[in-house]
Image (cartoon, helix red, strand yellow):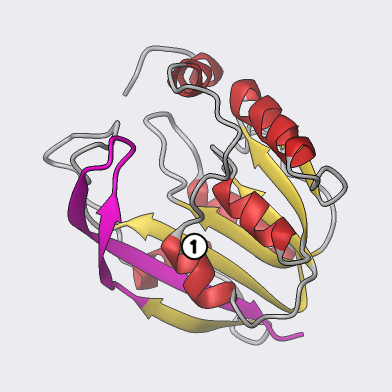
Amino acid sequence: MSTTEPRTFWDDLYAARPAAQDRRRPNARLTEIVTGLPPGEALDLGCGDGGDALWLAERGWRVTAVDISAVAVDRLAALARFHGLGDRVTAVRHDLGGTFPGGEFDLVCAHYLHTPFELDRAAVLRSAAHALRPGGRLLVVDHGSTAPWSWHQDPDVRYPGPREVAADIALDAATWLVDRADTPRRTATGPGGQTAEVIDHVLVIRRTT
């Protein structure tokens, strides 16, 4: 585990990347799963560079995008304004280990919400599920393998499968239904343009009532 304070770690990571005015690529599983859904209110947990939030906003969603890094949040807010999406994207800093955004949502996304620091992920995802409106979806996409460009290169790391993640969240089946839990492969492109085959762990939970 890193000895750096979490906010400093993530601020330094994003500050080391050049700021850009172009749209960052959205995550592949987001576009696959959300395309065709009617737009509503979305919550993006761990928004990072903001590709998902901007993609959703361009398609009519109103997005609350949160990250522990003030650098990431400030950059996303500036990008949203630059692209005329400032009225659809609200970027705010949250340390999800201590605070969770208020409101109700039709979609909550948690893409690659991994950290070298202690975080009760199950509690965060449980809060996310409870923040859904009836009919809303929680989309959790985790790493199932380590990409060559990942900050996390521990050869002994084990990534829990989507069914394990669902069991850890421990939601009442009378209210939340697992719509999808699988481990597809895809070819991913890294920040330097390099490519590699990776495994995603995909979990979609829908609130029924």
**Direction from residue 198 to residue 103 in the image, left or right:** right
State the quadrant of the C terminus.
bottom right
Q: Does residue 127 appear in this view? A: no
**Direction from residue 145 to residue 61 in the image, left or right:** right
Give the image quarter of residue 99.
Answer: top right
Give the magenta-colored segment's residue range: 182-209
Identify which residue, 185 or 138, lies in the foreground. Answer: 185
Which residue lies at the image location 80% right of the left edge and 70% below the top edge? 40
Identify which residue, 147 or 122, lies in the foreground. Answer: 147
Q: Is residue 197 above or below residue 133?
A: above
Q: Is residue 118 above or below residue 189?
A: above
Q: Please name the residue that numbered disc 1 is placed on.
A: 140
State the quadrant of the N terminus.
top left
**Disc 1 residue type (three-letter):** Val
**Direction from residue 60 to residue 66 in the image, left or right:** left
Give how far across and how far down residue 21 sits, in percent. Answer: 61, 33
Give how far across and how far down residue 121 sits, in percent. Answer: 50, 48
Give the image quarter of residue 160.
Answer: bottom left
Q: Is residue 11 above or below residue 48?
A: above
Give how far across and how far down residue 195 sits, in percent. Answer: 21, 50
Q: Does residue 116 appear in this view? A: yes
Residue 189 within the segment the image draws in magenta: yes
Q: Main secondary structure of the magenta part?
A: strand
Neighbours of disc 1 within 10 Å: few (<14), some (14-19), many (20+): many
Q: Dot 1 lies on which element?
A: strand
**Direction from residue 205 to residue 147 in the image, left or right:** left
